[in-house]
Amino acid sequence: MTLSMYQAAIPPLIRSLSNLITILEKGAAYAETKKIEPAVLIGTRLYPDMFPLSKQIQIASDIARRGIARLGDVEAPKMEDNETTFPELINRLQETINYLKTFTPEQIDGTESRSISLPIGEETLSFNGQSFLLYFILPNVYFHVTTAYDILRHCGVEIGKRDYLGSPEDLA
């Protein structure tokens, strides 16, 4: 079996971000049920030097959107990092998913050896397309989705592994 770059990139990212929407919806419902100000959950961090929930969502969105754009050799749409509510964060993720859905296999397949330069701070990381996808985009998105999950779970939101992974029925 051969797995294309498109198959390794777009469906897993869409699934992960879609599952994150479900997790955020449960967070919003929890805040309403428990009479907790949503801003408390959105501003929660696991440790003082870590980013809050809102920033975890923004970074997951940015890495998915910008990473795939870089693979496809196009400019990613800019998003302001100004979301302060659950609906705004959910909308950002949905816009990212909608953007990812605009990519065709022809744009992503064959990018395995594309040279990718990624400026981060004062250094520039260099990848080929396959390494960029497998060792930068996917792990970074999964890290920030997991951290968002962990923040809400730590706050008492009743979510579990199934929420993170999604429903097996959705895999067909």
Image: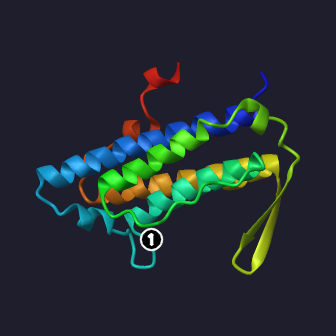
Q: What is the crowding at mark 1: few (fewer than 14 residues within 10 Å), some, or many (at least 20)? A: some
Given residues 77 and 48, the one toward you in this image is 77
Q: Check the picture and name the quadrant holding the N terminus.
A: top right
Check the image and tell me how it is coloured.
rainbow
Does residue 31 appear in the picture of this structure? yes
Residue under the image location 38 percent in, 62 percent down: 83
Where in the figure is residue 160, as x and y percent of width and height?
A: 34, 42
Q: Amino acid at mark 1?
A: Phe
Determine whether the residue tagged by mark 1 lies in a helix, strand or loop: loop
- Report which quarter residue 12 is drawn in: top right
Given residues 76 and 55, the one toward you in this image is 76
In this picture, residue 48 sits left or right of residue 124: left
Residue under the image location 45 percent in, 44 percent down: 94
Residue under the image location 26 percent in, 60 percent down: 155
Where in the figure is residue 134, as x and y percent of width and height?
A: 72, 47
Given residues 161 and 94, the one toward you in this image is 94
| Residue ID for mark 1 | 51
Where in the figure is residue 172, as x and y percent of width and height?
A: 53, 18
Residue under the image location 38 percent in, 68 percent down: 46
Where in the figure is residue 20, as x and y percent of width and height?
A: 42, 46
Does residue 143 appear in the picture of this structure? no
Q: From this viewpoint, which residue is outermost toward the top?
A: 172
Determine whether 96 is above or below 136 in the image. Answer: above
